[in-house]
Image (cartoon, helix red, strand yellow):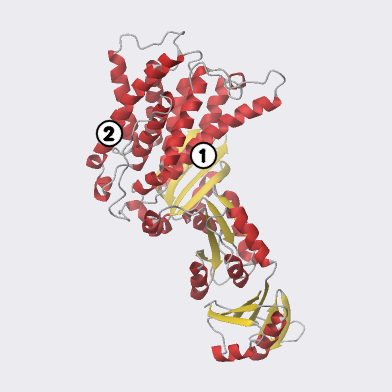
Amino acid sequence: MTAEARDPALGSDPSLLRFRALLDAGLAALEARREEVNELNVFPVADGDTGDNMVLTLRAVLDELDRLAGASAATATAPAHTLEQVGRDQIVASVARAALLGARGTSGVILSQLVRGAAEELASRPGELVDPVLISAALARAVDQAYGSVREPVEGTILTVVREMGVQVASDLARFRDARLPPDATAEVQNAVIAAVLERALEAGESSLRRGPDVLPALRQAGVLDAGGYALTVMLAGILGALRDGEMPAVEHQATARVTRPQHSSITYRYCVSFAVTGTRLDARDFRPALEQLGDSVLVVGDPSTLKVHLHTDDPDAATALLAVHGAVSHLDVNDMRAQLQRREQRLAAASAPTCDAVAVVSGAGVRSLFESLGVHALDGGPGYAPTSLDVLAAIHACQAEQVVVLANSPSALGAARRAADLSDKAVSVVPSLSPQAGLAAAVALDPGAAAQENAAAMRATLEHVRTGAVAPARLDDAQGRFRAGDAVGYVEEEIVAWGKPREALREVLEQLAHDAELITCLRGAEAPLDDGTVQALAHGDVEFELSDGGQPGQWWLLSAE
């Protein structure tokens, strides 16, 4: 977008227009190499999400700019408000907050600070054209903001790359006779000058990136360049392409890591946690020491009203509780790094990510195996199928796809699944399967190429044609005197239909499920008292019967009829 371009949705401020347009171009370039950036991610932990985190951060900024423009236009009388009329201070504050809240992981938090620094500098100079002087000032402020966000900056990373970009631009600026553009400079002249400055910055960034493995041993051992620094050069190339009418400079594609699990101290902690805290008179320095007692890779950035916290820890609840007394906790993101490391080799080998993944709460090795055979990620919910919302959230974020369906498989897991779906940045649909046998029937409908909502709808439709049953030992004596603790109790859906001996209870449940059924599936529990031959003999002859080892504790047989 040129300086003279006018977008009624975005206002008429040339600096602001250019800032928005260049961010958009950088995001498009990064989106195109998002997975490539993920594959380079080995430091500080090889969790393979740097590309995802940086994309989400930039997208949050652009969404906020568009939201401001849309909100002002929707509430204005003719003529519609522009972003300039919204107010520079509000725009800068909103952009900084959006970047902060949208940031995920270390790379996202650092990028949010780069955006914040550059935005504050650009917005502090009303009426100025974007020229070499303003670019140099914006880069310097962005570098200061990013380095200030990290307690112990590590060289060889994105921090070094952006710093050396800034040094190059400042050095070139010192040699210019007149670095300021006249107010009447044409769009073509302005674009050409900016492109020349950023091209030198890109060259410096790529040179810095290539030196990264000499500075940071983790990169050298893995045989890669820094993922965040590489992403930054890709973004800058996209910006240059926008300034040159689509002629984007070539950025060399990078090889993936030679090893799939580079060792680093943070592997000792299980969860990568980030969240926002909104309150008053918040000071990042007040919380860093206590957070560092809970883990490492601690980042706390923001302002007195909003902080973003990132750390690696084994106790996410303790981290959020530490800040919860000082403000409202939101935007909670929890990733199980051990699961991410285990999946890294498969992720790198995959040609492309599926559109949609599925997570199922399970109990028992056989049930786990059956779900996994259908391409569903299994989460061990224990004997009571009762994982916490953080357990479900970690399982969701361990999935490769950005859209996920969750099969709760028990009433006790349903609330945790819904809470995790609310907390996740991914598009998550929860299917109210209330038993593992119902969940298995629904999982057959999973289409990895379809959206989460489409898969959830298909699974719910399947459940409408499924009836479930079970036979389990009674835990207590029946208040009505029908059975005693340890007797067999048979259920169809939630209704008790049989009791007494295991054989008789199972026969009655099978007979009731056989009505209008074409297929009955039976999962044998870990302590089932009848052998498989006896169970097969009890099955109704006119209905197809499938018996599998579920290995579930506490329930002798789980059944479903379709």
Where is residue 100? Give x, y as percent: 50, 36
Q: Nearer the viewer, residue 447 or 203?
A: 447
> Which kind of residue does numbered mark 1 sit on?
Gly
What residue is drawn where x is 69% and y is 81%?
A: 514
Q: Secondary structure at mark 2?
A: helix
> Total label count?
2
Quadrant where the C terminus is found in the figure: bottom right
Q: Nearer the viewer, residue 424 or 301?
A: 424
Badge 2 local density, few (<14 within 10 Å), some, or many (20+)?
A: many
What residue is drawn where x is 62% and y is 55%?
A: 454
In the rendered image, the vertical position of residue 273 relative to residue 212, given as above or below: below
Q: Nearer the viewer, residue 272 or 210?
A: 210
Q: Which mark is residue 102?
A: 1
Where is residue 495? Give x, y as percent: 73, 76
Q: Is residue 531 visible?
A: no
Q: Nearer the viewer, residue 9 or 281?
A: 9
Q: CA distance from mark 1 to mark 2?
A: 27 Å
